[in-house]
Image (tube, rainbow, N blue to C red):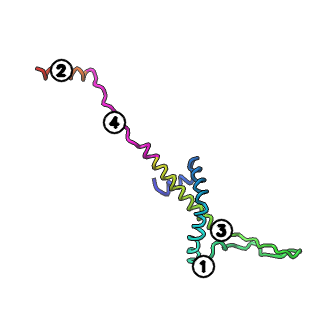
Amino acid sequence: MGFIKEFKEFAVKGNVIDLAVGVIIGGAFGKIVSSFVNDIIMPPIGILLGGVDFKELSVVLKEATTNEAGEAVAAVTLNYGMFIQNVVDFVIIAFVIFLAIKGVNKMNRKKEEAPAPPPAPPAPTPSEKLLEEIRDLLKKQ
């Protein structure tokens, strides 16, 4: 089974054990992966794209204004840079979970595929027993 096909089956189908492992690993490594993406992966990508900080990538939907009472109203923005970082976080976590499940499934297959002991030879039929007795009598002569 191809690696990508197996990953696709895992991501689409899954089962209760896969979900439980995903929740545990996601909770345990979520902060580590987020830090890895935010602090190690995205800065070099930002530099390659001309010094872009992904956290600040956004589209302003409505500019900041001041209301009648003189209070500042914050701008309304669509923060797609944070979304990109969260997608990268998800892909890394999903891939790690996939590798863990793949390892568990491989170990389970090895246990199931253990060779069975060879079957015992079948008991001789009555005609075979008779032929053996004849052979033994002929040897005595």
Q: Earlier in the sequence, mark 4 or mark 3?
A: 3
Assign a secondary structure to mark 3. Answer: helix
Bounds of the magenta segment: 108-126
**Would you say the residues marked 2 and 3 are in contact, meaning their CB atoms lie under 8 Å apart?**
no
- Whether residue 121 is in magenta: the answer is yes
Q: Marks 2 and 3, how far apart in space? A: 90 Å
What's under tag 3, amino acid-wise? Met
What's under tag 1, amino acid-wise? Gly
- On the image, the x and y values in percent for residue 10 come to 54, 52
Task: Answer left or right for 57 relative to 105.
Answer: right
What's under tag 2, amino acid-wise? Ile
Q: Please name the residue shown 46% across and 50% down the image.
A: 106
In which quadrant is the C terminus drawn?
top left
Say which residue label 1 marks. 51
Say which residue label 2 marks. 134
Magenta segment's dominant SS is: loop
Say which residue label 4 marks. 118
